[in-house]
Amino acid sequence: MTLLVIGLVLFLGMHMVPIAPALRAGLLARWGEQRYKGLFSAVSLAGFALIVAGYYFGERGPQLFAPVPAARALAPEALAHGMRVVDLSGAWRLREAQNRAVYGFHDENAVTADDLMEKAVYGLPELNGDRLPGAALVANPGCYATSVILALAPLLAADMVDREKGIISDSKSGVSGAGKEATARTHFVSVADNLSAYAVFGHRHVGEILEQLKLDSGELIFTPHLLPIPRGILSTIYVHLKQETKSSEVESWFKEFYEGKPWVRVFATPKLPEIQFSLHTNYCDLGFCLAKDGRRLVLVSCIDNLLKGAAGQAVQNMNLMYGFREQEGLQ
């Protein structure tokens, strides 16, 4: 296997470097992309801020990771060259036009884009792992979306959530979740000794949560916050259950739902996940506390936003696409 890393200076690119040896892959780190410019006509790769691009040379053909918003134009070209694409941008995650509007995409060929959108698989292996082996285009989920969807999926699948009372997700992320480019919000004097909410009722990951969990927009309030730490996400999620329930029942829902899923760890109540437990791993840690009334439930979900929330999950998707062990390169 050979991995091509383009844009090594960016956070996700840097996190492919330690993964490559674990995959027993040769690593080609590229700063200027002139060598690969001829592969694509729609998008020039010269000086392009691709974060991770990987080619798998074998009987099943090459693979390309293309985590940039311009992947709306790049993915059709990559697929035309026989590549299988894992896209780390939000280009192919959202099926509904009103949810995609936050990205402001303008497709040169709307028909081709719509066709690819229908074929794209949302790359959350714990939910869609059975669809990945035959997938040509995989949309790697957003980091916040990963933490929230994995926490809520078992309860919604069991039809135990009182959706009329609403779901609240209070999610907090380290500064790397905002990308490497410095902004007024991510400047040291703004972040240090501070905690701030942002993108309230307007975060781009909300659409993913709604679509994947089949929720109506009025059933979810999602508020992201910026933590003064480098990495990690902690989502605290508040739900009401339809009927009085025991903690042992809740725990069994989670353990049965994620049985055989190596990258989800379910904590036995009353122990709760912490950001430090999942840092530098591909794990999503899940825990909960149930009120004495057996109806009010608080969920806690923790991931490393750069691994399970991005680069690690991309490798997990790649492993399942090619029939490798799901843990390959990630342990």
Image: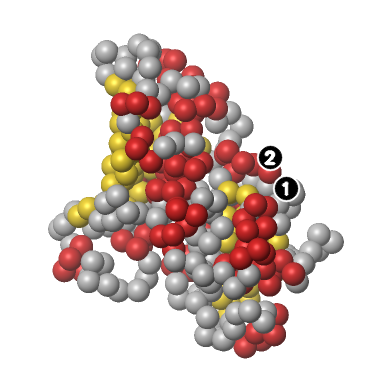
Instruction: Name the residue nearer the viewer: 179 or 2.
Output: 179
Residue 263 vs residue 108, the one in the foreground: 108
User: Does the residue at mark 2 contact the one at mark 1 (Cβ under 8 Å)?
Assistant: yes
Residue position marked by numbered label 2 in the rendering: 130
Q: Nearer the viewer, residue 229 or 93?
A: 93
Q: Residue at x 16, y 57 (%)?
A: 194
- The reply to whether residue 101 is visible in this rendering is yes
In which quarter of the view is residue 238 placed? top left
Percent coordinates x, y for residue 244 in the rendering: 35, 11
Task: Tell me the quarter of the image containing the N terminus.
Answer: bottom right
Q: Secondary structure at mark 1?
A: loop
* Mark 1, residue position: 133
What colour scheme does the image use? secondary structure
- The answer to whether residue 190 is left or right of residue 84 is left
Q: Is residue 158 left or right of residue 324?
A: left
Amino acid type of the residue tagged 2 in the rendering:
Asp
Q: Within the image, what quadrant is residue 78 found in?
A: bottom right
Q: Is residue 22 left or right of residue 309?
A: right
What kind of residue is marked 1? Answer: Pro
Q: Residue 280's mark? A: none
